[in-house]
Image (tube, coloured by chain):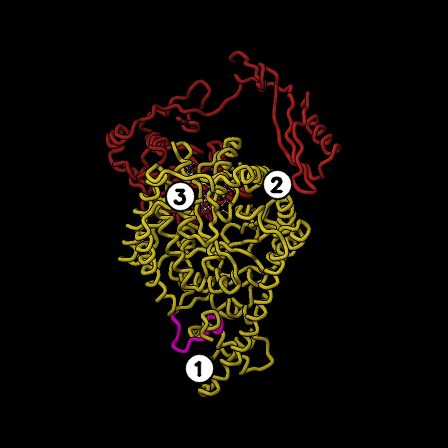
Chain colours: A yellow, B red
Amino acid sequence: MAQLFVEPGKVVRARELAQKAARGVQAFIDRHSTVAIERTVLRLLGIGGAGARGAPLSNLLVDKLREAKVLHKGAAWWLGRALKASPGRDPLQAIERIAAYPEKLPPLSPGEDAELRETIRADARSAARELREKVEKRKELKRSLQVGSFPGAPWKYVIVATGNIHDDVEQARAAAQQGADVIAVIRSTAQSLLDYVPHGPTTEGYGGTYATQENFRIMREALDDVSRKLGRYVHLTNYSSGLCMPEIAYMAAAERLDMLLNDAMYGILFRDINMQRTFCDQYFSRRICAFAEIIINTGEDNYITTADADEAAHTVIASQLVNETFAHLAGMPDELIGFGHSFEIDPAREDTLLREFAMAMMVRELFPRSPIKYMPPTKHKEGDIFFSHAYDVMSDLVAISTRQGIQLLGMMTEAMHNPFLMDRYVALKAAAYVYRAARHLGDEMAFKPDGIVARRQREVFDKALALLEEVAKDGMMAAIGKARFGDTARTETGGKGLDGVFERAPDYFNPFLELLEGRA
Amino acid sequence: MSEKHLIRPYGDRKDDGVIQLSFVLPVPVSEKAKEAAAQLAKKLGLSHVLVSSMEKAGEDYSFFVVYGRTHMQLDYAAIEVPVVAHRKHAFDELNDVIERDVGRKIVVVGACIGTDSHTTGIDAIMNMKGFAGDYGLERYRMFRAINLGSQVEPHALVEKAREVEADAVLVSKVVTQRDVHKEDARTLVEAAKQAKIFDKTIWIFGGPRVDHKTALELGFDAGFGPGTKPSDVANYIYYRLLERQGRAPPPQPTAHGTPDAIIQGAEKP
Ligand code: B12
């Protein structure tokens, strides 16, 4: 079993500090909304289509309201108001009409206003019910099938990334037959930077397909089918990151995805998305994930592909504790928080296996109820695929013997290209072997209380604690400004998407937020 | 012409020509599939073909590992590849010669361009810390290194280079799908020509899929691939700058090298 050699008092202290840091940001989140959140609200209210040139209606509507400078009241309110002003019209026309001259609209009496809100709330409740039914359907299928290779085995997670959703389906099916438990469909390069979600199926993506609702649907349908045939449930995951975190979370919920990459800071650090924007967006997206019981995967592994994995190990722990708090604040239970980390220490050094054991066990034990998401070596992969394969097998060994929950399998061709069909096959075969061979290794194994592993854990945790002290004192935003996470500095007003953040009016209306926060 | 030096792949004996391959055929595992794999290897010109493994990689796919022997041979002596031709200065020494020969700091601007968000490559070259124990350009007393990071539009990079009157521009591209690295590189070169700084600046292209030849074809002065150390780049910039100013003899060509190609394969571990 995994062992934790850190003093419990320190763990308690670290959590307090992380909470303090995150709460500072949460106060900001609670006063703001974003264009992405408002678009999600509209989508939830049934505005899912696209305009003539492919622009999503939810974008067109929100842009109109933003141009009219009235968005701070909430898109849901305006949708209700517009439909009241021109009943029977299509929503875009109705909104266009009132957005042209919002000041000319006759003011509503308090009674009428309350009534309007009630009507939309009723719509929201029925939309939520519908969503819930889909989630139940997903859970029902999963309950009826085997999950994972055996109890306690990490779920074997592989990637498909052809750029054509139909080819992706073909490769995902083959991967499932080869033993994969989770299929991740990689997104087109730079989708993160789009401030809208493209519409329809992707057949010619760049290094992946767009995360679109239609692509989600096509893939989930295929996986349902293959799961039934295999008698083993195959999970589907995608990315709720970038400028459209909440919209993608909603689409994933609607199309019965099981997991989403979703991190409170990834977009800020690695895609240069404005931090105010990401903090607000991650919150609403996680509210949706909590509701739809979608497991999120956090992105701390990226810190140690950017900075040196050995030196920056403490940033992983500190960030996980912050991510944990943000997730809790968004109503997520531990069982849905897949904390990310990875096997990334430079293989040219000595005793890296012990150091990897130290980290893997520490993460496992700090979050005992959560499904830990373990990433394979990537950064130090080079073109020697044979060495690379051996290197991956080491991470399989650590994963099974420390009971990581979800293991992304290393690809021997990582340094070259997106995984080929045969790369996945080789990785899945090796992981199956290692899981089988080391099935009970973890139960038998105990590290010395004062050995390399124990000392390494204490050293990393102490540094994490010191970092959290600093973050709690200066605030999250300042800490990011000082490149404390992922070796990357960002400013509060820098990055993309800040113009999509706005302060909520006192009478701001968001019926889903009310529902998801348990206020309605 | 030097003497011929004929070679073949070496498996277990000189000139046995042994090669190993692996591939997938989109057919279910069967004796017929195995024969197909063997025939494919023969069509590739291999003899003594051995399909050592056929694995079921999904219901409709078979994965093969195949051995065979090639009869191809080639003349090693006739192969030409650019090699390092100048003497590489160590850290302190380079600072000193720059001070002596250039007499001011060399200004370099770097970025990972387009939508590419990989920063580690350009950081390895530019940041203080450097790469594999070799200090980055920021650390050099005689370099002024400005690292714009990733996701930088080609035009923005050119604009910055113009503003600070950069001596050299360092461009990184890691994502190469559908040749996006070349596309972005061409956009950059165009932008530089329009801004009229193309001729007065040294253009350096780098990334794991970049080599010197490609970089030259794209209009750059040099290209640097995997394993590059910052000191390789620092030295190159120094020499190239002097050469541009007509103040130093061009780097000496070696037996098989060309003077332009001072870099690729430089001091690999
Ligand atoms: C770390 C990593 C990431 C990190 C990046 C973190 C960061 N801050 O940079 C994260 C997780 C963010 C990431 C994201 C993605 N990645 Co990535 N990533 C890698 C990985 C694992 C390692 C790259 C690395 O850091 N190498 C270490 C550095 C030091 O090496 P280097 O870049 O080669 O640099 C050296 C030389 O090339 C040279 N050099 C480089 N640039 C320059 C510039 C100059 C001027 C000079 C002189 C020299 C020089 O000097 C350096 C030092 O020697 C590689 C796989 C691999 N092992 O190579 C994939 C890889 C590069 N990624 C890949 C992809 C596809 C992506 C994504 C597009 C995935 C997606 N669809 O979302 C996204 C990027 C989205 C975007 N907008 O760009 C592919 C690229 C495939 C291809 N050939 O096009 C790879 C090969 C993985 C794969 N097998 O699919 N990635």
Mark 1 neighbour class, 10 Å CA radius: few under 14, some 14 to 19, many 20 or more: few
Secondary structure that dominates the magenta span = loop
Structural crowding at the residue carrying mark 2, measured as other residues with C-alpha within 10 Å and reported as few (<14), some (14–19) or many (≥20): many
Distance between the alpha carbons at the discs numbered 3 and 2? 31 Å
Q: Earlier in the sequence, mark 1 or mark 3?
A: 1
Instruction: Label 2, secondary structure: give it.
Output: helix
Nearer to me, A85 or B161: A85
The 10 Å Cα crowd at callout 3, few under 14, some 14 to 19, many 20 or more, is: many
Parent chain of label 2 = A
Q: In which quadrant is the N terminus of chain A drawn?
A: top left
According to the image, label 3 marks what residue? A359
Along the polypeptide, which appears first: circle 3 or circle 2? 3
Real-space Cα distance between discs 1 and 3?
59 Å
> Residue drawn at (63%, 50%), measured in percent from left and top?
A232
Same chain, labels 1 and 3: yes
**Residue B140 image offset from top left, x and y in percent:** 28, 36
Q: Which mark is residue A179?
A: none
The subunit carrying tag 1 is A
Q: On the picture, is A158 further left or further right than B196?
A: right
Check disc 1 and report its element: helix, strand or loop: helix
Up/down of A242 relative to B65, above or below = below
- For the record, the magenta segment spans A503-513
Q: Amino acid at mark 2?
A: Leu
Q: Nearer the viewer, residue A105 or A313?
A: A313
Residue position for label 2: A421
Residue at far front of view = A444
Label 1 and label 2: CA atoms lie apart by 59 Å
Residue A103: assigned label: 1
Percent position of residue B174, x then y? 47, 41
